[in-house]
Image (cartoon, rainbow, N blue to C red):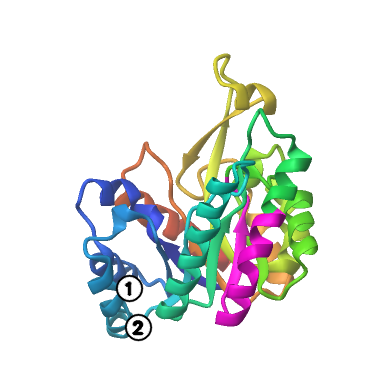
Amino acid sequence: MKLGITEYSYHRTAREGKIDIETFLGTAADLGFEGVDLLSYDIFWKDREAEMEKIPQWLAQTGLTLAAYSTSDNMVTEDTEERDRQVGRVTQAIVDASRLKAPVLRVFGGSRSSDISKERSLELVIEGFSKVLPVAEREGIVLAIENHGGVPGTSAEVLQVIKALDSDYFKACVDVGNFLGAGQEPTEAVPEVMPYAAHIHLKDMSKLPAQRDDARSQRLGYALESTVLGEGDIDYSVIFPMIEESGYAGFAALEYEGKKVEETEGVKKSLANIRRLLEK
């Protein structure tokens, strides 16, 4: 396993205009990460075309590997025009990932909708990606689905989508923390999806009492709060050996999302805890 960091770890800093892609890459290298995830989100770009041209040079200067490129999409819709728009978004992201020579494109399935059953939602995800998969295969880009938004949510649902598409170019981005949002313990989910992993996101969360006015926490029986990795309720002393035992040799990217500790400090603390846990 190689250690990376996703640009999303600094998304609040980016919204404030205090970090750009070049600065992020320099920061990641200075902290000792081996690779990075870059995102398609507008908040991280100042001049997309100019920066797309410069990224290979910046990566070479810092010695970093572009582990993955990431986009945001939602295939869970019965509106054909909207689905076509989402397919187009992923298609463009595949082209951009190929241009940047990223081996992996992180994608989402979609968000839960009260108007669409879970079974139908999963069908829509499969249908949507069946349209873009030929482009990914042609470009040599592995699509790695992350269980963000709830569809898919559990490890079984992630595997349902992957097995239905049945391609070496459609695998999993194993987001360790997101399984808690699906009501599943990461220590149960991670070993089930690791055989299909193309990428990993490392994050930590704390379980809090369920909130009366929050439907998700009422459904789960707990609310979730992102925190410094190693300070939450995910047992990485168990998770890291699971990853190692799977034989996974790709990148695992820190995705810091905590609010209580400012991003720069939260990343540093998380990294220190990761290194401590890996030394055990």
**Is the residue 151 above or below the residue 269 in the image?**
above
Q: Which residues are magenta?
A: 126-148
Q: Taking 130 as reference, is 264 left or right? A: left
Q: Would you identify the image quadrant in which residue 262 lies? A: top left
Circle 2 — which element?
loop
- Whether residue 154 is visible here, answered yes or no, is no
Callout 2, which amino acid? Gly
Residue 185, position in %: x, y? 71, 43
> Does any portion of residue 245 appear in the rendered image?
yes
Q: In terms of secondary structure, where does tag 1 sit?
A: helix
**Any magenta on residue 208?**
no
Residue name at image x 50 percent, y 44 percent: 231
Q: Report x, y in % for residue 33.
A: 41, 71
Say which residue label 1 marks: 29
Residue furthest out toward the front:
81
Q: In the rendered view, would you say 275 is above or below 230? A: below
Instruction: Give the side of residue 239 with respect to residue 213, left or right.
Output: right
**Image location (x, y in percent) of residue 236:** 61, 54
| Residue highlighted by disc 2 | 63
Residue 147: within the magenta? yes
The answer to the question of whether label 1 and label 2 lie on touching residues, with beta carbons closer than 8 A, is yes
Q: State which quarter of the image contains the N terminus.
A: bottom right
Q: Quadrant of residue 165?
A: bottom right
